[in-house]
Amino acid sequence: MTLSQPDHLVLWDIDLTLVDLSGSGGDWYRKALATVAGITLERMPPFPGRTELAITTELLTAHGVEPTPDLVNRLWQELTALATDPADDLRARGTVLPGVTDVLTRLTGTDGVVQSLVTGNLPAIARHKLSAFGLHPHLDFEIGGYGSLSAHRPELVAKAVELAAAKHGRAPKQVVVIGDTPNDVAAALACDAVAVAVATGRHDMDALRVSGAHAVLPDLGDTDAALAAILG
């Protein structure tokens, strides 16, 4: 990955944007809650477009448990251990979404482009998910915005931009956020970034257009269309 000053900082969501591991998060939370807090999971908050801090806080509160920093951290440690367990083959749980590998590869070979993440995932889980499918070489994990930072997704975008600027010596000329939910779009717009939405999750193209995305794609299967939307 080039360390030249970037013209484009491309920030990817992970779940239902790059990979589909549907059901895994609920499974890991169910086990982690039982182990760490002795709680039987009764209600799962919505995951799409939200951060780990928001999900964990809501989940504990809904089960009558105060989300203290210590408990949240212990729960995250257990989630990370479960998600990264070598015995749990993520490739058997899910798949890379259409066109993802080709688009990431083409962007990696494009001068002035740096790719990272804005994801609700915890950092170690984010890296593990993408490494499991061989997508990790395309991304600079050091400058990502992760779900442990804040319950508010725009803060993740702002943090990624800040880290990229510090690493490369100046802010990127253009920031592009790619995700599958209106929350991804809203986070991009709040930070004056370009919002590219893909209808590979639980929201259709009409809903993503209404949310204000600058470009909406059915998926990333058309590499040229995806690059045009991302690079403008």
Image (cartoon, helix red, strand yellow):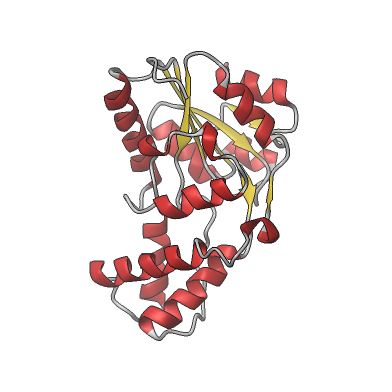
- What residue is rendered at 37% in x and 42% in y? 156
Q: From where the camera sits, is residue 157 visible? A: no
Q: Position of residue 155 (x, y in %)?
A: 33, 41
Please state which of residues 192 and 109 is positioned toward the viewer in this rendering: 109
Q: Position of residue 188 (x, y in %)?
A: 45, 33
- What residue is rendered at 52% in x and 69% in y? 28
Q: From where the camera sits, is residue 124 visible? A: yes
Question: What is the residue that sits farthest to the front in this orientation?
Answer: 86
Q: Position of residue 45 (x, y in %)?
A: 49, 67
Please give the count of numbered marks on the rendered protein: 0
- What residue is rendered at 55% in x and 46% in y? 130
| As drawn, 162 above or below 225 | below
Q: Position of residue 168 (x, y in %)?
A: 32, 21
| As drawn, 221 above or below 28 | above
- What residue is rendered at 41% in x and 17% in y? 6
Residue 110 location, quadrant: top right
